[in-house]
Amino acid sequence: MIGYVLRRIAQLLPVLLIASLGIWGMLYAVPGGPVGMLLGENATAEQIAAVTRDLGLDRPVLVQYFDWLVGALTGDLGNSVYSQEPVLKLIGERLPATLQLAVAATIVALVLGIPVAIISALYPNSWIDRILSGWSALALGVPTFWLGILLILLFAVQLRWLPSASTYVAFWDNPVQALRSVALPALTLGIYVSGILARFLRASLVSELRADYVRTARSKGLPERQVVGTHIMRNALLPFITIVGLMMANFIGGAVVTEAVFNYPGIGRLMIGAISNRDYPLIQGCIVVILVIYIAINLAVDVLYAYIDPRIEYS
Amino acid sequence: MDAGTVTTVGNGSVSEPVLSVRGLEVDFVGSGHPVPVVRGVDFDVYPNEVLCIVGESGSGKSVTALAVSGLLPETARIRGSIGLNGTDVTSADDETLRMMRGQEVGFIFQDPATTLNPVLPVGRQITEGQLAHGRLKPADAPARAVELLREVDIADPEGRANQYPHEFSGGMRQRAVIAMAMAGKPKLIIADEPTTALDVTVQAQVLAVLARRQAETGAAVILITHDLGVVAEVADRVAVMYGGRIVETGPVGDIFKSPKHPYTSALLQSIPRIDATEARLEPIPGTPPTPAALPTGCTFHPRCMLGNGRPRCQSEDPALRPVGPTQMAACHYAEEPRPTPQAATVRSAPAPRTGGEPLLAIDDLKVHFPIRKGILRRVVGHVRAVDGVTLSVDPGETVSLVGESGCGKTTTARTVMGLIKATSGDVRFEGRSIVGLSRGAMRKARRQMQYVFQDPFSSLNPVLAVEDIIAEPLRIHGLYDEMGGDKRIAELMDMVGLSRTMFGRFAREFSGGQKQRIGIARALALQPKLLILDEPVAALDVSIQAQVLNLLQDLQKELNLAYLFVAHNLSVVRHISDRVAVMYLGRIVEESERDALYDSPVHPYTQSLLSAAPVPNPEGRRARRRIVLEGEIPNPAKPPPGCTFHPRCFRATERCRSEVPAFLPYPGLPTRAACHHAGPLRPEEVPGPARDLEMVR
C-alpha cells in the first residue's frame, strides 16, 4: 500500500509538469500583460520597457518558464508581480481558510445528503421519497449566489444570529467563532452539493437493494437494519466516495461565487484577483496548488476504495 | 388421495411433513392488473427427502420457494397456507419470519458469484445469521465459521474463512453458500437452481456435498431446477410446475418411466440425451405462457398434443387428481395413451470424411494474452487461453468444441472469426489463410462465416426493428439491394420460422427462442458456408432448446452449412455433432467421431466429464459409478508442467508431471488423444457405486 501511494505520487510529477507548461502557454497566448495593468493606461513606451525588463518579461517565454520551474522545484513559486510578495506566502494565507470551508461544506453535504438518500431508497415512490427527491432537486437547482443571499437575509439581517461577511478564524484558535464565521458559506455550498450526493447515493442504494446478496442476507434472518447498514451500505459507498472526493476537490478552487457573496478570504478569490491583474506567477502558483490538492484528494479516495473493497488490489 | 396425507418415504418410516403448503396463490400487484404467478399449489416435504420442483421460466417455481420464507417483495399478495414446522408463514409477523429464516429454513441461490456480498469476509457471512439469532457468541463465531467450511470440504478452512468471495472459485463459493444455509441446522433447505451456473464437474462436487450434509442433518430439501438430468440424479419426489400450478407430482422413478401429464411427457421427449443418439428431438410447440397472459382453461392446452383442441381443455382448468397408484396429474385426459412420437429413425451415421480440402482448418493456433504489471506495463507473463489447437471442419459438417468454462473454446471461436488476434498458428478458410488479414480482407472473408452469440437477450440491438437487425450484415457489406432487399429479409424470416407479420417489431417484443431465431437469420443473411455457434441454446428454456436445435439441423441440411458448435452441455453436443473435440486448459485433449467419443472415450478428462454429467434416467442411479474430479481448472497463466490435467487425473504418473503428451491417433478408434496413458476406463478406476452423488440414507 505504501509503495502504491509513493508510486502514485511519482506519477503526479509529470502531470504537474505538463499542467504548468500548459498554463504558462495559455497565459502568454492571451493578449495583454501585467505591465499594462501595473502602469495604467497613460504609461509611456519607455516606462513599459523599463518595467518589462525589471520583471524579466523581455526574455524568451521558454526561458521564463524554466526560470519559474527551477524556482518551483526548490520550493520558490516566485513573487507576485503586483504586490511583490512571495506567491507561496499569499497562497499560504488563504489556503487554511479554503480548506476549512471545504471540510465544513462537505460535512454539511454529507449530514444532509446521506439520510435523505437512505430514506428515499428504502421507501421508493412513497410520499416521503417524493418530498425528499423534490428537496434534492431544489437544492441542486437554486443558484449558490442566490441561496447565499437568502441565507444572509435570514440569519444575518433578520435573525442577527450570524455575521453576514465571513472572516477566517482558525478552528483551533477559537472554535465557536470559527464555526460562526464559516457557517453561512458552508451551508450555501453544502446544501447545493447535498442535492447531488443524495441523488447519487439513492440511485446507488436502489440498485444495491436489488442485488442477490441482499436476498441472501435476508434469507439468513438478518434484521433489516443490519441488511441495510452492513451489507448494502458498504457496497453503495464505493461509487459514492468518488463523488464526495470530486465535490470536495471542487470546493478548493471552484467556490469563487460563494466566496465572493460572503467576502470570504479563500483561494478562489485570490486567483480571480490574480487573473484580472495578469499576475502570472500568482495565477500559476494558485493553479499548481489547487491541482496538487485535487490529485491528493483523488489519491485519498483511491486508498479509501481499497480499504472498503477487498477486490481492489494495489500492488 | 390428498397431496397432504402422511406418506411413507425413503426408509419406510412415517413422519410429519416439515413443510406443508395448501392452496398457495401469489399475485403480483403492480401498476396494472394483479398478475397471478402462483395459482393454487399444494405440496408437502418430509425430513430426509428431496423434492424437486421442475419448470420453465414463468412457471412460478422460484416464487413458490420464496413465499415459503416470506421473502417475496411487498408487491406480492399471498393467499393459502404455508405450514413450516407447525407455524403458518402467511400469518406470521415480520420478526417471527426473520427468526425462522436461517433457523427453520436455509436458502441456496443460483449464482454463487452474486449471492455472496463481495465486500465482507466469507467466514463472517457464514456465521452472521446465527449471531443475529443470538445462537452464537461473537467470540465463538470465527471458530464456528472454520468448522462449517471444513464440513463442506473447503481445504485450509482457517485461511479461507478470512478471505473474500472473489478469492474463492465458483464451486468453492457455492459450497460456502451451502455452509451458510446449513449454519443454523435448518429442517428445510431450499435450493433454487443451485448448480445451473456451475460446470459439470463442479456441479457433481456441489451436489455431492449437499447430499452428504443433508444426510448428516436429516433436513428436507426442495431443489428447484430446469435440468431433468439433475432431477433424475437427486430427487425422491418430483413436482412439475406449469403456468403457476403443479401439473404433475409423484416419485421420481414413476415420473420418468410413465409420465401422466402431457407436459411432463413432452418435456422428457424434448431433451437431448447424453446416453443415446436420437435422430430428431420432439420439441413442444409454442412458448411457455407468461403469467400476465395465461391461456383459458388448462394453461397447457395451446401446446398440448393430447388435448388436441378438445373444448373441455379450453374452458376448464383441470384439478390435480390421482392418476395411478403413486402419481397425481392435472389433466382431463391423463389416462389416455399418448400419441406416440414419429418412429425415431436412427440418425444416419455421419458421412465419411471426404479427405479433400476442409472448409475450415485450424492449425496449431495459439492465443496468449500478456499480463502487464507496474508503471511501465512490463509483460510479466501470459495467459495461455488457447495453446496449440488443431481442428478442421468439412463442408456440411458439425464439429463441436466442448469443455468447461475457461478452457478456451470461445476464445478459439472468436479468433477464427478474427475478433481476437492469434498469437501464432494458422486458420485457413477454403484453403486460404485468414490470419493477419487486413481489416477489409477479413471483412470479406467473414461473409463466408458468421457468428451466432450465446445470449439472445443482449446480442440484439434494442433500438433496431427486426428487419433492420437481420439486414445489418447485408448493409455493412453493401449487398442489401443486390441480394434482394426486403424480399431477402422476408425469405430469411421464413427460413428460421419467424412470421412475416413480425416486421417492424423490436427485440424486446420477442421471446428468447424467437430472439435466437433472429440471431440465426442475421447470421444467414450473407449466405455463409460456416456458422460459428457459441452456446446458441444455453440461455433458452428446455422446451425451446429443442426447437432451435431442430431448426439448426434443418438449415444445415437445406443449405449445406458447416457448424463449429461451441458448448458446455454434453447432451446437446452429442445430439448435434458429427465430430467432437474436448478442450482442457487451451488444448484439445481428445477428438473423435461423436459416438466413438461418447461410447468409448480414451482420455481420462473426457471420461471424468462424461461420468460427471447427470443422466435423465433415475433407474439404476444407485448403481451408477461416477468419477468426481478433485479441484477445478487451474489458472491458465500458470498451467501445471507436463500434461496440464495431471493434478486432477486418476491415471497420472511421474511421466505426466514432466512430459507434455502429443496429440496422437488412438489405435482402433477414429480418435486422437493427448494422453500418455490413453485407453478405455477400467472398472477399478471408478469409485464404488454412486458413492457421492446419490443421496445417502
Image (cartoon, rainbow, N blue to C red):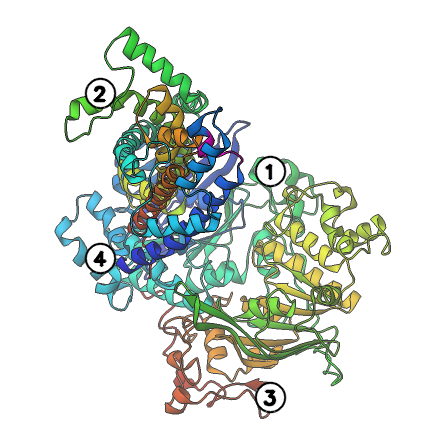
Residue B686 spot, x, y in % from top left: 40, 81
Q: Which residue is mark 1?
A: B294
Q: Looking at the image, do the residues carrying marks 1 and 2 touch, with CB atoms under 8 Å apart?
A: no
Q: Nearer the viewer, mark 4 or mark 1?
A: 4
> How crowded is the residue under tag 1: few (<14 C-alpha within 10 Å), some, or many (20+)?
some
Which amino acid type is marked by label 1? Leu
Span shown in magenta: A31-36
Residue B282 in view of the camera: no
Horizontal relation, residue A49 to residue B118: left or right: right
Q: Any magenta on residue A35?
A: yes
Horizontal relation, residue B610 to residue A218: left or right: right
Q: Looking at the image, do the residues carrying marks 2 and 3 touch, with CB atoms under 8 Å apart?
A: no
Q: Secondary structure at mark 1?
A: loop
Q: Looking at the image, do the residues carrying marks 4 and 1 touch, with CB atoms under 8 Å apart?
A: no
Residue A247 in view of the camera: yes
Q: Nearer the viewer, mark 2 or mark 3?
A: 2
Q: Which residue is mark 3?
A: B669
Which amino acid type is marked by label 2? Arg
Task: Depth check: give the residue in front, B122 or B271.
Answer: B122
Q: Which residue is mark 4?
A: B145
Mark 4, chain letter?
A: B
* CA gap, disc 4 and disc 3: 51 Å
* CA gap, disc 1 and disc 2: 67 Å
Extreme residue toward the front, this view: A46
Q: Secondary structure at mark 3?
A: loop
